[in-house]
Image (tube, rainbow, N blue to C red):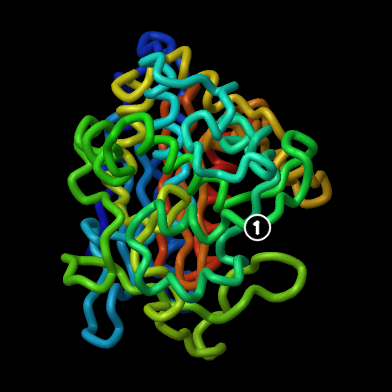
Amino acid sequence: MKNTIITLALAAAFVIGINAQLLAQQPEKINKQHLVDINNLIEDLSNRDAFSGTVLIAKGDEILYQKAVGTADKARSLKNDINTKFNLGSMNKMFTGVAIAQLVEKNKLSFKDKVCQYLPNLPKKTFGDITIEQLLTHTAGTGDFFEFPTFESVADTAKTITTYVNIGLQEPLLFKPGAKLKYSNYGYVLLGAVIESVSKMSYFDYVKQNIFAVAGMNNTDSYERDKTNDNLAIGYTSGPPPMGGPQAPPPMGGKEREANTKMLEVKGNSAGGGYSTAIDMHKFSQALLAGKLVSAQTLATMTKGKVTLLPAIEAANLPEVKYGYGFSELFKNKVRVIGHNGGAPGVDAQTEIYPDLGYTVIALSNYDRATMPVMNMIKEILTQK
């Protein structure tokens, strides 16, 4: 099939960062029929115009399945392919969490340090009690810069972390630091500024040098959308999510999607908005598990859930999701899953890593609310008892 790679190498594989001998003794979780079923679902969703993007399933460094469907640029009739770069949304937070952890390993800061220690220009009356850890776990009380009154005035020009920091300096905290959780993009902008302060490099240069280059991620960056970029998918949105939470987009014949080019900021930042490919995100997963980015002990600390992001909903068979340092963690049928998702108008991205099984699953879409049916099917297969 066009744009499809199915590798049925289902013998025991060496999985970086995991005991290969133990894995070899385990039955394979994904078989040929599973891959056929997954492929049929993706094709059905694509035919109904409910999914556009790419899906990758790997065990260790072996890619078992990869498929690209849909259109990267409708105006120019350019199709998505395996090298198309998709907006990651908040998946960038994993890179920011890793960058902070690297600096902790180098004894340049501590998770318990106060943020004002590294950003002395922050108003201490507001930010003085906030720790790095609270920013990482969304418990600092900082808000969402998308909701700040001055965001719209800088969205089309902001290309530095400092610009985003400045628009929130006079914003009040939503609650006392550490009191509860409120997902905060501004908190991750502050973490980006901490990385710049400690490393003496721009955030973008730091993650390029210390994460992307180390992992071999040659097609990942916070690309500036007002410049010419190779093979960057344009997002297409079907409008705000309906009341009651995210749902899949309507099938063909529903509301026509609108390009998101005027809805996104001109450049991503340490909270999100960068671009990558499914292949590069697989490389990130492998480098992470192999100890190339942080030690195994640090990775365990980062990815351990510390606060509840989403409670379990037994009626819908949804597990509790907890948040660590730039990573979410959940257990389904006692199988551990770590990673992050990202969403925005015309953006839906998910990376799920099964560290005890050795699998990585990635879905990147240039439609909003599009990846859930595919990711749910794969999760059910991988976590079946």
Q: Residue 49 appears at what percent x and percent y?
A: 45, 78
Asked if residue 247 is positioned above or below residue 181 in the image, the reply reads: below
User: Quadrant of residue 241 in the image?
Assistant: bottom right
- Packing grade of label 1 (10 A; few <14, some 14-19, many >=20) is some
Q: Is residue 276 left or right of residue 51?
A: left
**Horizontally, is 292 left or right of 166 in the view?**
left
Can residue 199 be seen here? yes
Which residue is depicted at the point 47% across and 12% down?
297
Q: Amino acid at mark 1?
A: Glu
Residue drawn at 47 percent across, 75 percent down: 153
From the viewer's perspective, tell me whether residue 255 is left or right of residue 182.
left
Occupied quadrant, residue 18: top left
Q: What residue appears at the point 47 percent right and 23 percent down from the top-left corner? A: 27
Instruction: Give residue 355's position: percent from left, percent from top.
Output: 47, 25
Tell me the quarter of the picture where residue 113 sits.
top right
For mark 1, what is the residue?
171
Q: Using the image as rendered, state which of residue 17 and residue 252 is in the foreground.
A: 17
The residue tagged with tag 1: helix, strand or loop?
Answer: loop
Is 177 situated left or right of 272 in this image?
A: right
Q: Residue at x 41, y 69 (%)?
A: 265
User: Looking at the image, can residue 38 be seen?
Assistant: no
Residue 212, image x, y percentages: 25, 38
**Pick the front one: 171 or 264:** 171
Towards the viewer: 354 or 24: 354
Classify the position of the N terminus by image quarter. bottom left
